[in-house]
Amino acid sequence: MRRTLAIVAALAVASPLTAAPALAAAPQRGLGARTLSPTGPRLDIAEQRLKTRLTMNVPDRLLVGERVPVTGRLERQDLDGTWGPLAGKRLDLQFSRPSGPDWKTIAAPVTDADGYYSVQVLVVENGAWAIEFANDPVNFPDDYRGYEMAYAHTSVRQVTHRTSISGFNAAPEPVGRGGTLRASGTVMFTRADGTKGRRAAPPCGSSSRPTGRPGRTRPRSRPGATAGSPST
């Protein structure tokens, strides 16, 4: 009888069914806000992404052929609700013509230690601007998967061209007091690559000035008429 009880006790101590679980039952939070919730021998993994927000600033005046700064900031919200900078992250700056949408990447700025970014871009034509973060699940790094996508954009922005007048001429010369000079020429605009092209414009107006006196004279006003601003 004693020998039987000893054998049973030895088997109970050596049985693998009495082994303690390798993981504690309390949930654990890992990098990227992943929550581990073990239930018995099985692990149920729930991934919680951090919210992000993104801003973008584009200058009001866009002159074709100039490089302008596009700036902004990327932030992420911690699990306790606090917003802070998201450093060292690559963004995707895109541009689309008004006839689009035809979004094309034109720059890929990276945020600094405080979450700010700044990139110089060439102004080419009218269009809209957009910047986004973590919106390419195929190509972005694995650590980006711990964040939600962020996006900022502008409406279609109108650009301004540098202009000049080619072949300017005034005739007839000389002209007497009270006479009329007729001016002619071609209005040219400058493209982003520095070349020039013709630009449609209303005909040049005429003005009169006394002979022998430099400068312009004020046009005569009809009785009852008021002076208006010149057309642009």
Image: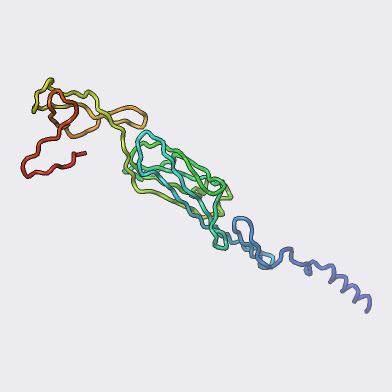
Query: Toward which corner of the image does residue 157 lie, by quadrant?
Result: top left
Q: Quadrant of the N terminus?
A: bottom right
Q: Residue at x 79, y 69 (%)?
A: 18
Q: Name the spot of residue 156 as percent of width and height, x first.
A: 33, 46
* Residue 14 drawn above or below residue 67: below
Q: Residue at x 31, y 30 (%)?
A: 190
- In this rendering, the count of numbered labels is 0
Query: Toward which corner of the image does residue 184 lie, by quadrant?
Result: top left
Q: Name the spot of residue 195 as percent of width and height, x first.
A: 33, 27
Furthest residue toward right: 2
* Residue 14 located left or right of residue 50: right
> Viewer-proximal residue, 78 or 28?
78
Furthest residue toward left: 223
Scheme of colours in the image? rainbow
* Residue 198 located left or right of residue 30: left
> Viewer-proximal residue, 218 or 160?
218
* Residue 170 located left or right of residue 47: left
Furthest residue toward bottom: 1
Q: Residue at x 40, y 42 (%)?
A: 95
* Residue 146 located left or right of residue 230: right
Query: Toward which corner of the image does residue 120 lie, by quadrant?
Result: top left
Q: Name the spot of residue 79 as percent of width and height, x first.
A: 57, 61
Q: Residue at x 69, y 65 (%)?
A: 41
Q: Name the spot of residue 97 as percent of width and height, x first.
A: 34, 42
> Viewer-proximal residue, 10 or 128?
128
